[in-house]
Structures are given as structure tokens and as C-alpha cells.
Amino acid sequence: MAPAILLLSFLLLGEYTVGLAPSGPWDAFNFAPASRTVYPRSIREYSGNVTSASSILSNGSLTLSGDESYVVLDFGYEVAGLISLNFDDVSENSSIALSFTESPLFISPRTSDDSVVTSANLSYDGVLNVPAPLQTGYWTQPSAQLRGGYRFLTIVSTSDSSVSLSNVSAALDFMPHVDSLRDYSGYFYAADPGYVDQDFLTRVWYAGAYTVQIDTIPADAGRDPNHPSPGWANNASMDSPGPVLVDGAKRDRSVWPGDLGISLPTQFVSTNDLNSTRNALATLYARQDASGGLPYAGPPLDLLYSSDPSDTYHAWTLVGTYTYVLYSGDFEWLQEVWSNYTRGVKFLASKVDETGLLNVTGTLDWGRLGQGGYNSEANALYYKVLTSGADLALWLNDTSLSAAYTANASALKSVFNDAFWQADKGLYRDNTTTDFSAQDGNSLAVVFNLTESAEQAAAVSEGLTANWGVYGAVAPELPDTIAPYIGGFEIQAHFIAGNAERALDLLHREWGYMLYTPISVQSTLLEGYTSNGSLYFRSTDGYDYDASYTSHAHGWSTGPTSALSFYVLGLQLTAPQGETWSVAPQTAGLPYAEGGYKTPLGWFGVSWASDGGLWNVSVSTPDGTSGIVRPPVAGTVSVDGETAELDASGSLPLSGGNHTVSVQTAG
Ligand SMILES: *[C@@H]1O[C@H](CO)[C@@H](O)[C@H](O)[C@H]1NC(C)=O
Ligand SMILES: *[C@@H]1O[C@H](CO)[C@@H](O)[C@H](O)[C@H]1NC(C)=O
Ligand SMILES: *[C@@H]1O[C@H](CO)[C@@H](O)[C@H](O)[C@H]1NC(C)=O
Ligand SMILES: *[C@@H]1O[C@H](CO)[C@@H](O)[C@H](O)[C@H]1NC(C)=O
Ligand SMILES: *[C@@H]1O[C@H](CO)[C@@H](O)[C@H](O)[C@H]1NC(C)=O
Ligand SMILES: *[C@@H]1O[C@H](CO)[C@@H](O)[C@H](O)[C@H]1NC(C)=O
Ligand SMILES: *[C@@H]1O[C@H](CO)[C@@H](O)[C@H](O)[C@H]1NC(C)=O
Ligand SMILES: *[C@@H]1O[C@H](CO)[C@@H](O)[C@H](O)[C@H]1NC(C)=O
Ligand SMILES: *[C@@H]1O[C@H](CO)[C@@H](O)[C@H](O)[C@H]1NC(C)=O
Ligand SMILES: *[C@@H]1O[C@H](CO)[C@@H](O)[C@H](O)[C@H]1NC(C)=O
Ligand SMILES: *[C@@H]1O[C@H](CO)[C@@H](O)[C@H](O)[C@H]1NC(C)=O
Ligand SMILES: *[C@@H]1O[C@H](CO)[C@@H](O)[C@H](O)[C@H]1NC(C)=O
């Protein structure tokens, strides 16, 4: 790349981040508070001798008298960061402790919900004892004992003496590099008249956005996975020059490449805070081993195990690299990691044997059972590595490498269908020694375009509904478990197969449950749960029946946020930074939707509405770009008031700028 071009892209990258999305009624759904100092909104409960409890909400003092007297404060939504308070009246023997929890099910004066390791007693973390003797005046929790995610704070007296306190607050520490947490570069707004909450789609879009914000942590605030019980510490180094996008707020506070498959697109369409993703990816490349293998998890967990932990998570680092460069156009960084990236592709290629399939030997994955051998999920991911790697190579002008990746991809696609497709079931099987069909392999096969026809994608979309229950899609590959991470890919698969109403049905079941259930936080999204809606996620698969360990703010569960932008608005980038784009809305019976997002080239916005026989869309894209609009209905088409014809693929080619496309349907 010529130095002048490098400089230009660098300057643009710095500049665009100041731009905000337009304001409007959608701002009321933004969960991020205006100030980084937040106060409890209500008293959840109290017990023992508590005097003037509610005055704590209006600058007054409350008094706890006697051992185990406690008050539970509710911030009203998921928060994170250090607690401060004022001790107004203490005596010689006064002492108190703090406990924290995301779910109200684990409110307790004796322990916090678990964040360090799983423990069947659900009380590994214990409480934070405020060092005695207490002093009157302002007190702040030690920074090492930061809690990364909670909604409820319990303050308990731990002696027979009384203590009066006031001015309890939390200092939000996430996304430390931005001035205002509410300054989003993207937005989304739609009505959902068929659901109990007509604002559900807007609300879930913002819940996903806020979840990823709270998962963007300072470089010195990773989780210490070795802290002894009781207690915890979140002061481990992320080995990064700046903030890092991690998997979850309370835990793991670590870089996990698979999670980026969902959290990175969420981040792009909402805050566009892509540096924290680049920082996450950089920690993974810095740990690449001599064979080209990439870690299962980055710092501070650093799960490198031996040398070959997880072929799928290895692949996700490579896919994440593509996605980051597509959104940012950061070719400078791509060139820095390019030799590592290509070694990473070779590492996977070396596992392809004479069958033409990748034989998985690094069997760790997102928590599913039965990974290994000729697995369809892993081979779908490898296909995506090859197709996206071909694009990356092309963008770096390495046409021969690009052609080689493309050739390998098309060979794999054909072998994949021969090996895994079960025409009688209309689903792909999990591996070559089973008839069993998984949610992950089938969803990713559609999302990554392993299907060879629209009919095949439609069959998979239909077949996946067999796993649905009232609370969402149960993953057959992790029995009795609802995995919203994989559910996020399934949502995309239904949209791609043209079944937008089916996608909304699953959104209502699964994300509707997560967003409104009283056992979660009604603001950020759960890591996972069981088929009956309980928090005993992965109880027999590593989580030791510790329901309090489950995270309530996991970026991997935010699939709807980007899906609503990419499929309901229908707005997608088809070249880096949106130099080319497409607008192909799926209305799903909704009356209207609007929104958009930013790239270094500028604002991309879409607003559509159905009104009787008229369907209208306004599209705003930067000058100098070009794209297509594909209307979701048939009829007489006009562009900016002039009659127009769709091309053979049902699309209208348009140049950048502001355009209105209308379709008058017959009758
Ligand atoms: C690739 O080649 C094109 C055309 O010569 C040039 O404009 C572009 O900057 C090159 N890209 C890189 C990353 O070097
Ligand atoms: C992102 O990183 C680039 C390059 O290091 C820097 O110039 C830019 O200011 C960063 N943007 C933000 C919002 O921190
Ligand atoms: C409760 O605490 C207050 C203030 O310390 C004290 O005056 C009162 O006697 C206590 N009540 C009981 C029943 O212990
Ligand atoms: C509490 O006090 C602060 C300043 O001391 C003031 O800004 C705030 O409005 C007060 N809040 C209430 C609820 O009285
Ligand atoms: C504090 O505890 C000590 C030791 O139990 C006791 O001697 C002392 O009287 C207590 N002070 C008060 C004010 O209760
Ligand atoms: C809970 O179990 C952990 C080990 O998993 C132990 O270290 C801890 O002391 C136990 N806590 C309680 C309160 O029993
Ligand atoms: C109350 O807490 C806030 C936030 O921590 C702090 O800025 C303020 O100084 C405290 N007020 C007093 C009177 O200490
Ligand atoms: C590439 O991988 C090596 C280890 O194999 C690592 O030392 C180096 O930092 C990586 N390069 C980048 C740019 O991450
Ligand atoms: C093939 O899939 C089944 C079902 O998921 C699983 O039980 C089995 O272990 C898998 N085989 C291999 C080699 O991993
Ligand atoms: C996959 O590779 C491993 C390690 O080389 C080997 O033991 C296993 O038999 C292979 N699996 C298949 C299905 O070939
Ligand atoms: C998906 O694959 C088919 C060939 O099977 C191809 O025609 C089509 O363009 C691909 N779609 C995308 C979005 O890449
Ligand atoms: C599109 O319209 C908006 C609002 O009227 C305007 O700010 C923007 O500059 C226009 N974009 C282009 C590329 O003309």
C-alpha cells in the first residue's frame, strides 16, 4: 500500500468516531446512563433492624443495627464498577460487608453470585468486608475488588454495633476511552405490533448494544481466575495497549474469539468502537504458537493448553479479522498481522485429509458436546475462513493467494454437501459417523452459504424449528440447553432463507424471555439457560451446577442487534467501509423500521414504511459509494420520483447520496 493511502485511511479512522447517530424517539431505549456515576433506583428488600432505609434514595442516611441486618439496593439495570459511600455515624465495633449479584435469585447477605470459578455451593465469591475499624466520611471499594457486572448490591452489618451510611453510588468503568456512554454512532427503531411489547425490537437492539458496551473493559481490569475463596479480583492485565472487548461483564472478562463472531457485528452497528476488537484480536495473534495455532482464549485466562486446543475458536480469530477489516478498512493493521493470519489458515489446511474435509483434533468449542473428526460446524467455519480469506487477500492485492483460497473453498463446499447433507431430513448431520443434526452446524451452513440452493436453505430453516420450545431453540448438541450464542446464528439463517417472520418468532421466544424474565436483569443478555428457563446453564458441562456463575451480560447473546440492522433494515456492507453496499429489507409484516450506522466513509441510513399499497424506502449513503436496493414487494417501482426497472436479480443499482425508492403494489 502506498504511504499516502495509509495516512489517509489512518486519518479517516480517527475522525469518524466523533460522529453520532441522529437523535429521536429511539434514544429513550438506550440503556447507557448519561453519567458514569450511578445511584440505586430502589430498595429491593431489607431485613433485621434497618432504620430510614428509603432515605438512602434521597441523600439521607440509613442505619443498620445488629449483626446480619441488611439492605438490598437495586440499580434498576445491569451496572459495573466501584462502589462508593459515605459513613455518617460509626462506632468502635461497627463493621459491614458488601455482596453483589446480577440475578435477584442470588441476593444474599453472606455471598455474592460466583465470578471466579464454579462451585456447587454457589458461594465461592463470598462478600467484600469493608476493613474495620470504619472511619466516618467517604469510602471507595478497592479497585482490585471491582465487580464487573451486577444489578443488586447488599449492604450487611457484620457486628452488633450500628452504622449509618449514605450516598451509595457505582462508578461505571467500562468503555473508559469514551466521554459519553450514550454516544452511539448507529441506531435502530421499529414497531412490533404483534408482540406484547410493541417496542420489543428496539429494546432488544439496545439491550445487545449495552451488553457489548459493558463487555468492553479497561486493559487492567481482567479477571483473576485463581483468586482463593472467599473473594475475587478483577485487576489482571489484558496485555493490551487499550480497552478490550471480552466475553462477559461479571465473567470471564477474557478475550474469547468465538464470542466475537456475534459481539463484533453488534459493536459495529451500535458504537463502532472497533479499536477494542482490534485490541482483542491482537492479543490472540501475539500468542500464536510455532505451528500456527491460535489460543482458545486470550488474556487473562490464556487458555493455550498444549498446542491445539480448539480448531473452531482458531477459525473464529481468522473470521473476526475479516469482519473487523470489512467494517473498518484498517488495511494497515491487516498488513501487520498478515503473515500470522496466513499461517493460521495453513494450520487449518494441514488438517484437511484425503477426504477433502477438515479433521478436527482441537476439540474444545463453545460448550457443545461431540466435537471432533469430520464435524460439520468446524468445516462450515473453515469454509468461511477460505471465502473471507480470499477477500482479504484480494484487498491486499495478492490475487494468486486469493484464487487459491477460493479454489479450496469451492472444493470444500462440494465435499461438505456430499458428506453431511441428509436430503430426507432436510438438515446437515453433525459428523460423518452420526445421523444426528446440530443447531450450530446447520445454522452456520446457511449463514456461510454452504447451501447450494435456496430450497436447501429453506429446508434447514424449517428443520431447525423442530428444536424450539417456549423459551427458545434448544441445542441438540448440548442437551437441555438454550444457547443464545448459536441462536444468534440461527436467527440469521432464518432471515437468509427468507423467513423473516420465523426469525421474529424465535426472537420473541428466546430474547423476549431473556429481556423480561424477573430472574435476570432486564437490560443485558444472558450467557445461556436451560430448556425450562432456569439459570442452570451447562450444569453437567463444566459449570458444576453453579447457577450463580452464569453471566447475565454476554456479548455472544446479542445476535439480534446486528440481525435487525442487516436484515430488517436490510443494510449491509459489501466492500470495506461500505464503498459498496446493499439494502434488502425483510419487512416480516412490520409497518416500518429505520436506523443506520457509520463507517469511516460516513453515514449509512435506511428508513422504510408500508402504507396500504405503497412501500417506500429512503436510503442515505456517502457520496462516492454505490450499491443496490432490493425491494421486498413487487409492483411499479420509482426512484426519486422517476419510474424505474429492477434488474434480473430484482435489484436497482444506485450511486451514493440520498434516494427514495417507492413500490406501488398491484391492487
Ligand atoms: C491494491 O491495488 C490498488 C490498485 O493498484 C490500490 O489502489 C490499492 O491501494 C492496493 N491495496 C493495497 C492494500 O495495497
Ligand atoms: C483507534 O486507534 C487508532 C490507531 O491506534 C487511533 O488513531 C484512534 O484514535 C483510536 N480511536 C479511538 C476512538 O480510540
Ligand atoms: C434498631 O436500631 C435503632 C438505631 O440503632 C435502635 O434505636 C433501636 O432500639 C433498634 N431496635 C431494635 C428492636 O433493636
Ligand atoms: C443529592 O445531593 C446532590 C449534591 O449533594 C444533589 O446534586 C442531588 O440532587 C441530591 N439528590 C437528591 C435525590 O436529593
Ligand atoms: C467493642 O468490642 C470490645 C470487645 O468485644 C468491647 O470490649 C467493647 O466494649 C465494644 N465497644 C462498644 C462501643 O460496644
Ligand atoms: C464453597 O466451595 C469452595 C470450593 O469450591 C470453597 O473454597 C469454599 O470455601 C466454599 N464456601 C462455602 C461458604 O462453603
Ligand atoms: C457522594 O458520592 C459521589 C460519587 O461517588 C461523590 O462524587 C460525592 O463527593 C459524594 N458526596 C459526598 C458529600 O461525599
Ligand atoms: C505473530 O506471531 C508471533 C508468534 O508466532 C508473535 O510473536 C507475533 O507477535 C505475532 N505478530 C503479530 C503482529 O501479532
Ligand atoms: C459425532 O457426532 C456425535 C453427535 O454429536 C457425537 O456423539 C460423536 O462423538 C461425534 N464423533 C466424533 C468423532 O467426534
Ligand atoms: C483425525 O486425526 C487424528 C489425529 O491425527 C486421528 O487419530 C483420527 O483418526 C483422524 N480422524 C479421522 C476421522 O480420520
Ligand atoms: C452462495 O453460493 C452460491 C453457489 O452455491 C452462489 O451462487 C451465491 O452467489 C453465493 N451467495 C453469496 C451471498 O455469496
Ligand atoms: C443526505 O441528506 C442529509 C439530510 O438531508 C444530508 O445531511 C446529507 O448530506 C445528504 N447526503 C448526501 C450524500 O448528499
Image (cartoon, rainbow, N blue to C red):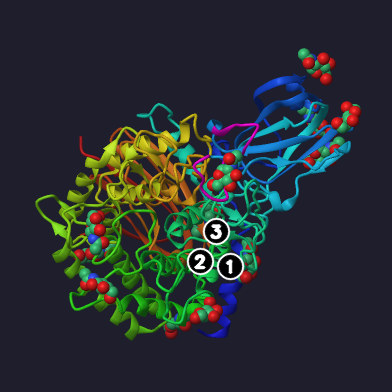
Q: Position of residue 350 (x, y in %)?
A: 31, 79
Majority secondary structure in the magenta region: loop
Q: Are marks 2 and 1 in contact (CB under 8 Å)?
A: yes
Task: Compute the Cα span from label 3 to label 1.
Answer: 26 Å
| The C terminus - image quarter | top left
232 versus 327 height, above or below: above
Compared to residue 196, the image places residue 481 above or below, namely: below
Stretch of the chain drawn in magenta: 106-121
Instruction: Kindly tell me whether mark 1's CB lies below 8 Å from ligand 2.
Output: yes
Secondary structure, mark 2, is helix
Hey, what amino acid is under mark 1? Leu
Magenta segment: does it hold 463?
no
Q: Residues within 10 Å of mark 1 (few under 14, many from 20)?
A: some
Q: Quadrant location of residue 103? A: top right
Disc 3 or 1, which lies upstream in sequence? 1
Residue holding disc 2? 328
Q: Ligand 2 closer than 8 Å to the CB at disc 2?
A: no
Residue 123 placement, left or right of 469:
right
Q: Is residue 111 magenta?
A: yes
User: Which residue is disc 3 drawn over?
Assistant: 254
Whether label 2 touches label 3, CB < 8 Å: no
Type of amino acid under label 3: Ser
> Which of pointers 2 and 3 indicates the residue nearer the eye?
3
**In what element is the residue under mark 3?**
loop
Q: State the residue position of label 1.
A: 13
Q: Residue 641 location in percent, x, y?
A: 36, 48
